[in-house]
Amino acid sequence: MALLSNEDREYLKGLFTGMKRDVNIMLFTTEEKNFCSFCNDIKEILEELKSLSDKIKTHEYSFEKDKSIADEYSVKRGPALVLKADKDLGIKYYGIPAGYEFSSLVEDIVDIGNDTISVDESLVEKVKSIDVPVHLQVFVTHTCPYCPPAVRTAHKFAMLNENIKADMIDSNTFYEYANSYGVQGVPRVVINEKHHFEGALPEEEYLKQILNAIM
Amino acid sequence: MLQLKMAKQEEKTKNKSFDLVIIGGGPAGLTAGIYAGRARIKTAIIEEMIAGGQSATTEHLENYPGFKNGVGGVELAMMMEEQAKKFGTEVIYDSVVSAKLEGEEKEIHLASSVIKAKSVIIATGATPRRIKAEGSEKFHGKGISYCATCDGALFRDKKIVIVGAGNSAIEEGIFMQRFSDDITFVQDLPYLTAEKILQERIKSYPKTKFYLGAIVKSINGNDKVESVTIKVAKDGSEIDIPADGVFVYIGYSPKTGFFGKELKLNEQGYIPTDENLKTNLDGVYAAGDVRVKDFRQVITAAADGAIAAHSVEKYLENK
């Protein structure tokens, strides 16, 4: 069954037209059945996207069997999606990018494909100047309309600076993991394990939180 | 069924000047966009998040006419958005920082640009009112939530307290049953205020408890919420209810904070209008939950949108 309506498909085709570089989406499935109950749905989403642009390439791996590749991209669990251009951009989705998060995935693809930076100009240099490792984990649910901006900002920062790695984590699929961070409201952004904030902050505030965390 | 939702941003708009700018893309703003588009008024809707406003956080609407089996809040909003765009209305995803609403030419200052308009419909809606009780600041986003559709899944098999017993509270309480059956309602009034059909439905869940005529005194815990202390009005007694999560539905606050003093508001911050939905300023109209009215529903917001667009059409004709 098609996931997207014809209207949506046409809209996306238009959106993806003119992308100048390949967008590689690497899917890591897992043998853990509980986590992979949506893996077929993820595959379907990727099939749909691939059919809409010849710049979108998808690759399937197994988190367990392709351990070395998973390690190379620092994939910690499956299912996971790694989005990259030629090189790794530090952008991941743990769990299915469905519901509102489909928006995040689409916008990421457009940014990567066009090689554009959609961070506010006044902040670009500040983001680029971060010279220590930053790991952003953005906990979401698919039914949270406030969450995609939090994911996108993390991913945009990661695109700008290779010291920054940014993960979307679906709190439903990774319930225990979310629990281990005490996530009780989404979006919650965890910075380098220790710091966190709630809510979709504007880019400038978001960056302040990161800068405070690494001080 | 698997759902894929997206905010569809049209080609970056080159237009910086419109006949009508609608602030807010909820049911009121979107309906105004449909009517204005059909009246061939050059219109833009500015939405900061995703079409639908509050209705997008409503899982399921059962009382919107025409959908006998109900319709998802988001689905309805997205259909309205498509419909508005079909008639030529642009949707700009950006947040409004401030607005100059006096005079012939209005200016809407967005996060990244300024747009000009001959007329404005304010359809910014309202946000859930924050609970004020001991501990409520401490646990904001850490056990206290205003969005069950967002955060409900984080409380599987946990003890839930829902504050309020109006339509939103009861609807979300019914929604939360899929995650937990340990749900307790606390309401200040001595009776439920939700529609009767919702009351019947929530009472069909045998484990649901109600404390009516009681207020929340404090939300307690160390690192996370452990209990809610309520005070019963009639005898002043206090009861401690074990709780992991607190979902709050005690009404709304209008989103009018970024408007200047020139726009008249009532004491609660809502915008008074005349029957054509005109505010105190010429060329400025208000529609939906943001205006002073008794009954805030998707359908009354949509109706407001239609009326406001019609008033704008007349205003622009007479200029």
Image (cartoon, coloured by chain):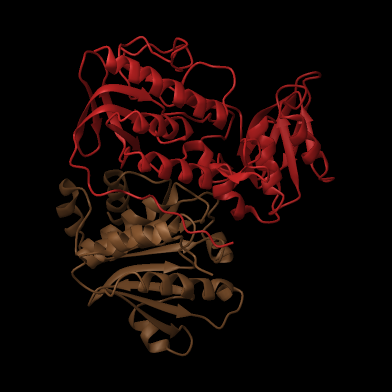
Q: Nearer the viewer, residue A161 or A141?
A: A141
Tell me residue B298's x, y (percent).
Answer: 55, 32
Identify whether B158 is placed above or below B114. below
Tell me residue A99's x, y (percent).
Answer: 49, 57
- Quadrant assignment, res A93: bottom left
Q: Colour of chain B?
A: red
A77 on left or right of A90: right
Tell me residue A46's x, y (percent).
Answer: 42, 72
Quarter holding the C terminus of chain A is bottom left
Q: How many marks?
A: 0
Residue at position x 21%, y 61% in the image: A160
B298 on left or right of B200: left
Residue at position x 30%, y 65% in the image: A109
Q: Colour of chain A?
A: brown
Q: Can residue A210 be seen here?
A: yes
- Quadrant assignment, res B100: top left
Q: Can residue A134 be seen here?
A: no
Tell me residue A86's x, y (percent).
Answer: 22, 77
Residue at position x 30%, y 11% in the image: B282
Q: Nearer the viewer, residue B41 or B24?
A: B41
- Quadrant assignment, res A97: bottom left
Identify whether B149 is placed above or below A23. above
Quarter holding the N terminus of chain A is bottom right
Q: Nearer the viewer, residue B25 or B15?
A: B15
